[in-house]
Amino acid sequence: DLERDRLTVAALETRVNLLTREASSADAPGRRSALVAERVRTLAELERMRTQVADGVKAISDIEDEARREGVPPGWLR
């Protein structure tokens, strides 16, 4: 799940960059406002996914710490 979330973050970052370029070069005000609105939604989703990735990293770290405290051999966690 964590790797999938990281890929999603990368895709969203690419999408934000594309929307930023398109919005800055759009001639029609209606098109520009639509692109800006989509960019805002994408930025919100990007922030949510970044939080999800950080939570996933912390969860894995917590599991590793707990296993270490319980004496689980390191190879078993891989």
Image: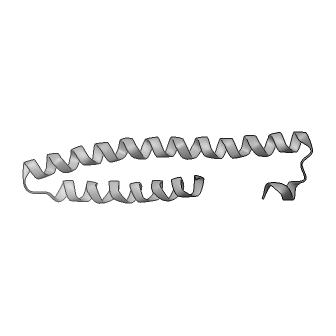
x 15%, y 45%: residue: 33
Q: Tell me if 2 is positioned left or right of 48 in this view.
A: right
Front one among 45 and 14: 45
Front one among 67 and 29: 67
Q: Position of residue 8 (x, y in %)?
A: 46, 56
In the depicted structure, whether residue 43 falls above or below residue 28: above
Front one among 73 and 48: 73
Q: Position of residue 26 (x, y in %)?
A: 14, 57
Q: Tell me if 68 is positioned left or right of 22 in this view.
A: right
Q: Tell me if 54 is positioned left or right of 48 in this view.
A: right
x 59%, y 52%: residue: 2
x 66%, y 41%: residue: 58
**For the image shown, how many numbered marks are present on the structure?**
0
* Location of residue 12 by image quarter: bottom left
x 58%, y 57%: residue: 3
Quick one: quadrant of the C terminus? bottom right
Q: Position of residue 18 (x, y in %)?
A: 29, 60
Colour treatment of the image: one colour
Q: Tell me if 74 is positioned left or right of 35 in this view.
A: right
Q: Position of residue 54 (x, y in %)?
A: 58, 43
* Location of residue 16 by image quarter: bottom left
